[in-house]
Each structure stands twice: as C-alpha cells, then as structure tokens.
Image (spheres, rainbow, N blue to C red):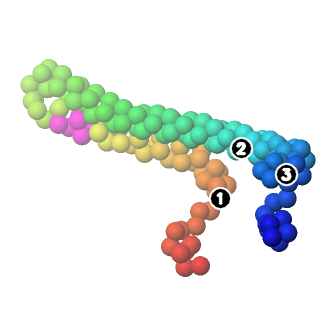
Amino acid sequence: MSADDKGEGPKHAAGEGQISPEDRAAIRQRSEELGRKLDAINAKRAEAEKELDTARQTAFGQAFRYSAELLVGVGLGGVLGWALDRQFGTAPWLMILLVILGFSAGLLNVIRAAQKAQAENEALQRAAPSVTDDEEDEDK
C-alpha cells in the first residue's frame, strides 16, 4: 500500500515530488500577500522609529537647555560677584552671595521651563493609552 492509498500526505497531479500549477499559483499568491503585509509592517515600524528619534532629540534638547540655564545663572553670578569684590574690596562675600543668587535664579528658570513643558505635554499624556503593569499580567 502506498501513502496515496491511505490518504496520507499531499496528492500531486504531476506525480511524486511535483507541484501542480494550481498549487504553484496558490503558493505564489500567498507569498505575495505575505510580502505586502511585511512591507506594511516595516513601514509602520520605520515611522514609529522616526517618531521615537524625534522625541529623543526633543528630550535631549530640553535637558541641554535646562542644564545650560542653571550653569549660566551660576557662572554669571560668580563672574559678577568676583568683579564687584575686586571693585569694592569685599572678597569673597559678594561673589558667594551672587553665586547663590545666580543658582537660585537658574533653578527658578529651570522650574518654570519644566512646568511650561509639562503643561504643553499634558494633553498628550492624558490621551496616551494606559500600560498594564507586568505584575498584573502575571496574576491573570
């Protein structure tokens, strides 16, 4: 008894080990369909990566801005205090005072900028989908 007699294995029109033209066309059609689906998925992935890169660049820019504002406040206070100390002969008291005031002013600028950025992004944060906790997934 052969495998064809038992109903086991694929049946081929042209004989053992041959694929019929109908099967070839079906395989080709499925292959093309899979190719189109993969192209669509790759396009979506590329778009998502581009958006992620843009978000990272924006975040890096904001971090640089915040650190620059803080450093400029301290640096400007230190230089101004040093110059006034030399002028009035009060070293190092005006420099210490103005470095502290420069730090405070820089910190205040950073806080204001962060609050502004948070207010601008609040609508996006509220619209974002909720993400489940890993521990919640394990419990189910």
Task: State which quadrant residue 84 falls in.
Answer: top left
| Left or right: 119, with 25 as reference point | left
User: Label 1 amino acid?
Assistant: Pro
Q: For the residue labelled by badge 1, is the local secondary structure a helix, a strand or a loop?
A: loop
Task: State which quadrant residue 120 falls in.
Answer: top right
| Left or right: 20, with 115 as reference point | right
Marks 1 and 3, Cα distance to the nearest angstrom? 56 Å
Q: Which mark is nearer the camera, 1 or 3?
A: 3
Marks 2 and 1, Cα distance to the nearest angstrom? 25 Å
Q: Which of 126 and 106 is in front in this view?
A: 126
Q: For the residue labelled by badge 2, is the local secondary structure a helix, a strand or a loop?
A: helix
Q: Name the residue under label 3.
A: 15
Q: Residue sitting at 80 percent across and 70 percent down?
A: 1
Q: Position of residue 52 (x, y in %)?
A: 57, 41
Q: What is the magenta range?
A: 96-101
Q: Which of 38 and 135 is in front in this view?
A: 38
Marks 2 and 3, Cα distance to the nearest angstrom? 34 Å
Q: Where is residue 20 in the image (x, y as percent from the top left)?
A: 87, 47
Mark 2 Cα shell of 10 Å, populated few (<14), some (14-19), many (≥20): few
Q: Name the residue under label 1.
A: 129
Q: Residue sitting at 27 percent across and 34 percent down?
A: 74
Number of on-image labels: 3
Earlier along the polypeptide chain: callout 1 or callout 3? Answer: 3
Q: Is residue 100 magenta?
A: yes
Q: Where is residue 17 in the image (x, y as percent from the top left)?
A: 77, 50
Q: Name the residue under label 2.
A: 38
Mark 1 Cα shell of 10 Å, populated few (<14), some (14-19), many (≥20): few
Q: Residue sitting at 85 percent across and 51 percent down?
A: 15
Earlier along the polypeptide chain: callout 2 or callout 3? Answer: 3
